[in-house]
Amino acid sequence: MMKFKNVIIMCFLFVSVLTSSMTLAQMNTEDRFRLESIAIQGNERVTDGTVLTYLPAKVGDEITLETLDRFISILFATNLFSDVSISRDQNAVVISVRENPIINRITIEGNDVLTDEKLLEELDIQPRRVYTRDIAINSTKKLLEIYKLSGRFAAEVVPKVIRLENNRVDLIFEVDEGELIKIESIRFIGNEAFSDFALRQVISSRKRRWWAFISGMDKYDPARLDYDVRLLRQFYLSRGYAEINVERVQGGLLQDRSGFAVTFSITEGPRFKFGDISIESEIENLDLQGLLDVVSAERNDWYDSRVIEEGLLNITNELGNLGYAFVNVVPEPTTSEDKKYVNVLIRIGTAQKNFIERIDFVNNTRTLDSVIRREMEIIEGDPFNRLKIERSLRNIRGLGYFRDVDVETLPGSAANSGIMRIKVEEQPTGDFSLGVGYSSIEKGKVTLGLNEKNFLGSGRSVKLSASVSDTVADYRIGLTEPYFLNRNLSGSFEVFNEDVQADTVDIERTGFSTSVYFGAADDYYHRVGYDLAKNSTTQKSSEATSLTGEENKSLTSSSVRYTLGRRTLDNRYDPTEGSLFEITEEYSGLGGDVNFLKTRLRSAYYKPFAFRKYVLGVRGELGYVDGLGDKISQSARFSLGGRRLRGFDAGGVGPRDIGSGSAVGGNKIYSGSVEIISSLGLSDDLGMRWTVFSDFGSVWDTDYPDGVTKPNDNSMRQTLGVGLLWDTAIGPLTFFWADPLSQESHDKTKRFQFNIGTRF
């Protein structure tokens, strides 16, 4: 009986499975059909052909209902349609669509702080683009993010869509900018080695202060606060705290939404000293000890990550000088078990010597390639040499044509070749300067200058200047060709006319000067020049008590001069590193009426320190003129004051005529300056720097001592002062205030100097 039941059950299951299979097969057959036609309805702007190109099947293909569902999904994904439906009439398919509208106009209303141009540029959506709801949502989020970055966390943005005829829309963003939310407090938790005050000087963010609008550093900016975390970490790492951990506590918006409270959490850890400094290399036959010597870290010195970074850079440069362009130099610091020392192993990876395959210049939209290329000390085919590359970059920076100069080395077509990309950022090279001043000698004074250092991108320099005051009129026109006759010669020519209307005498000087400059090896250079000038002096009054040697005479001077110098300054116009030394001999007597031999020595030295936060500048000058048996007239003597001795008027130091009080100059001179230059702790984008300086010098000795106040007094004058150098949108502004520490009663002081200019 039991067996019979089992047989019946098995038969039933067999019949059920067979029936199900037949039904499924029938369903699959009914779902599948061969597509005979596709019709598109509702499209106005989008063509039938465009719609058909998106579909994964074409007429004649065998498809299923699932394929039709895919049609709908794909067409929705194009963002061209707001609605898609499909109907089927046997083997014919009809696709009905409703097109998304086209954006007619995008406007922003209610914004005052941020302009329409800035906001629309950030949105990056244009009219005639297909409108979708996602565009409105994403654009709203982006606008809110822009306002947050500007410190306006209470800003609100409401998108509105105005429907127009022909399926067009106007997209309007109504903005409520809200109040600017600033930092109300800055706190530090866990700091024991350094006070809150010291750490506040490290970070870039500042608490709300009335003067902070100059920099905007009191604005709440999450990105800048993350940067502050890195600054704090670097600060501790440079002072021995190798296990420092700094975090920014999230949150901080005050309950009344008036500002943010910023908190930094610090875990200092122990303070470490340098332990063993060692080096390993996968490159054979290197002088490892010589490479280790360029790392200034010494055992038992306090650990300083900046010293290691500087050492790695020095090692990389040394390897670059040996021809290794692509080499990894990596430090591996480890702390000792007693938590007292940091041992540093410097690993040099494998590399091979490289050659320069090609040199490309990038972003020089105005300056010709040839102008930059002629400053290169390395050319295609040369072995890679970091020192020559750095000297080439220094030469390019020294042109003064570029705001920034950088080099990128890329792999070449062969394993041992490299491509150099010199990237530059053009800057205005034309200067229009306007100086306004007042002195007891010249009274009111206006100086106009027009100087283009890179005329038409050719490297030629054109200069026009005029200085007019109640007593002096000075006009000059000059031209400089940096590669005269297509050689490494710089030729210059200048025509000048100077008219001095003093109380007792009129002096007019007219002439021209020309010179040729050429460089030599190891940064040396030579300059040879010739000057021809006619000096006419007219005595106006008997008030003067001294003789100039030129009374009521018209004298012609014809002189030749030679300069030998060496310059390693990183920037000729605004140096921060390097030195300058030059000696100039000028002989007058090649015809004409004036005979003399004038010697002048000039030197300068600039050195960044405190990890390049400050620049020390030292300058000096010595001068002597000999009459070669004749007496030296006033126009050939030296004068001192003004920018060379800040705190004194131009020509304000040295012998003076007892009767008229005017400067008569001297046959001997020395001057110098020591200064420190740095930024104001503000962003470099502001272009503001300060300087503290001390100038000193003296000028004395005249061949006509009668009627002159202290003609042989060589006592040193000295000043102490401060200055502000500000590169503004209207041009460079300079402010100097200096107080004389030592002076003579007959000297003329000028404590404040101001100059303004502009560039084009």
Image (spheres, helix red, strand yellow):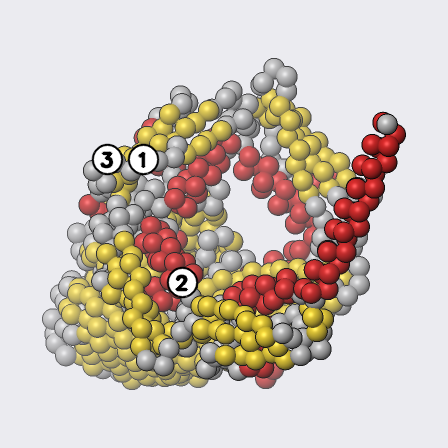
Which amino acid type is shown beneath numbered disc 1? Gly
- Front residue of this view, candidates 194 and 715: 194
Q: Give the foreground label among 3 and 2.
A: 2
Q: Secondary structure at mark 1?
A: loop
Residue 547 position within the rendered picture, expressed as x and y whole percent measured from the top left: 23, 70
Residue marked by disc 2:
133
Vertical arrangement, residue 699 with respect to residue 502, above or below:
above
Q: Quadrant of residue 499?
A: bottom left
Residues marked 2 and 1 touching at CB (< 8 Å): no
Q: Quadrant of the C terminus?
A: bottom left
Q: Could one spot residue 89 in this view of the protein?
A: yes
Quarter that holds the N terminus? top right
- Tell which of 177 and 245 is nearer to you: 177
Q: Is residue 18 left or right of residue 100?
A: right
Q: Looking at the picture, how far across and down is residue 225, in whole percent?
A: 39, 41
User: What's the amino acid at mark 2?
Assistant: Arg
**Residue at figure coordinates x 56%, y 60% from the top left:** 406
Residue type (three-letter) at the residue carrying disc 3: Gln
First in residue order: circle 3 vs circle 2: 2
Q: Quadrant of residue 438?
A: bottom left
Viewer-nearest of discs 3 and 1: 3
| First in residue order: circle 2 vs circle 1 | 2
Residue highlighted by disc 1:
252
Cα gap from disc 3 to disc 1, whole angstroms: 9 Å
The secondary structure type at the circle numbered 3 is loop
Q: Which residue is mark 3?
A: 255
| Residue located 50% across and 69% down the image | 84
Cα distance between the residues tagged 3 and 2? 34 Å
Is residue 284 placed above or below 547 in the rendered structure?
above
The vertical placement of 114 against 207, above or below, is: below
| C-beta proximity under 8 Å, tags 3 and 2 | no
Q: Is residue 531 visible?
A: no
